[in-house]
Image (cartoon, grey):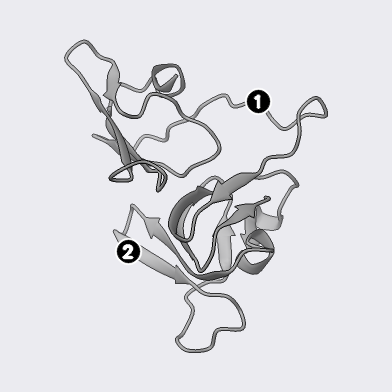
Amino acid sequence: DINTVITVAQVDTVLTYDPTVPGGWLTAVRGTDGNLTGTLTTIDAQRGYWIHTSNDDPIKTDIPAFSVQSTPPEIALVAGWNLVPVVEVVAYTDDTVDADTYFTGLTWSKAYGFDTATDVYTEVLPTDDVTSPVTTDDLSVGKGYWVFLGKAGTLIP
């Protein structure tokens, strides 16, 4: 439940993108009763999220780690744009993972990350794409990224 995961009162809007639903966007807005309500009712590790707050305080949630009682995560993606999380199953160096490693098995052509502190998108390209300069080829664990796929596939973090 979104109100169990996001308990910080300064969060007033949460968005995610689900290309399998008409219009794509799922939203939750904080109502006068203090609850987040709308078409986005749950938070999970299958999507990336845009979270708007009225301050810069970090949001911390208690999310159980991957365990032997559960199967490793897999995220079904569609052809076109997907908003995906960078989920950590194994410990990555410096809390980052190479984009080509993370997107292994996918037909991806471009990804974008967004830095809320600078309001700047960072372009990430496959290492074999030399058509334009790449700001970074690493993805940050715990962040969400837009990734464009040439065909549907399954992300296996």
**Which residue has dot 1 on it?**
64
- Quarter in which the N terminus is drawn: top left
Instruction: Work out which residue is located at the far left of the displayed protein and give it.
Output: 32
**Residue drawn at point x = 58 percent, y = 65 percent:** 138
Q: Residue at x 33, y 53 (%)?
A: 117
Q: Would you identify the image quadrant in which residue 80 lies? A: bottom left
| Res 120 label | 2
Counting other residues with Cα less than 10 Å from the Cα at mark 1, is it few (<14), some (14-19), or many (20 or more)? Answer: few
Say which mark, if any, is on residue 28.
Answer: none
Which quadrant of the view contains residue 46? top right
Tally of marks: 2
> Where residue 134 sits in the image (x, y, percent)?
49, 79
State whether residue 99 is above or below residue 72.
below
Which residue is found at the position 54% from the left and 64% from the top?
A: 151
Left or right of 5 in this view: 88: right
Residue 87 seen: no
- Which residue is the extreme one toward the bottom? 131
Q: Nearer the viewer, residue 137 or 18?
A: 18
Q: Which numbered mark, 1 or 2, is in the foreground of this view?
A: 1
